[in-house]
Image (tube, rainbow, N blue to C red):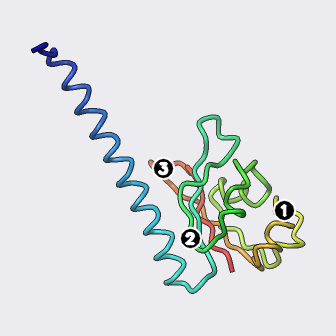
Amino acid sequence: MNKKPLDYYKAIYKLSSEADSAVAVESELSALVENTAKTIGVKGCSIMMLTEDQKKLVRMADYGLSKTYVRKGLAELDTVMAEALKGTPVIVKDATTDPRVQYQEQANKEGIVSMITLPLVMGGKVAGILRAYT
């Protein structure tokens, strides 16, 4: 039998621990957006985090939104997102006509009327946004 070096087993353990951790984080984020939407009584909720270059947002979890709506791709920073990423909550009363909203037509098709976008702060810096849709 070919015996593997201890470093091999340590590497396998580290990889499996990181995979378990990633699944746990995804599950927690999914529960967070679902509970948020249900608690405040909105159509849906999502969490998006900044990419390393801080030019786009990646959707980490969502609830109450169709797969078509969520699969629009990486979100370029529109005016609403940029304002929220400065640390200011932003309310959009009409997502289908507000020029600050990036995907007005898709919002209309999804039945989204309004949204609130809140900054998510980690380690003293805004790292993403939480968005609730009505």
Query: Residue at 50% of width from left, 76% of height from top?
Result: 36
Name the residue at 48% across, 50% down. Answer: 124
Pointer 1: what residue? 100
Give the mark nearest the N terminus, 1 or 2: 2
**Amino acid on which disc 2 is placed:** Tyr
Given the image, on which type of amino acid does mark 1 rest?
A: Arg
Vertical arrangement, residue 83 with respect to residue 42, above or below: above
> Which residue, given by chain and number where applicable, does mark 3 sit on?
124
Q: Relative to 30, does residue 20 appear above or below in the rendering?
A: above
Task: From the viewer's perspective, tell me whether residue 52 is left or right of residue 73.
Answer: left
Quarter holding the C terminus? bottom right
Depth check, mark 1 against mark 2: the one in front is 2
As helix, strand or loop, the secondary structure at mark 1 comes to: loop
For mark 2, give the secondary structure.
Answer: strand
Q: Nearer the viewer, mark 3 or mark 2?
A: 2
Q: Locate residue 45, reporting x and y percent.
A: 59, 71
Residue 52 position, x and y percent, is 59, 36
Amino acid tagged 3? Gly
- 54 left or right of 101 in image: left
Q: State the SS at label 3.
A: loop
Percent across and percent down for residue 10 are: 20, 26
Q: Which residue is mark 2?
A: 63
Which numbered disc, 1 or 3, marks the residue closer to the eye? 1
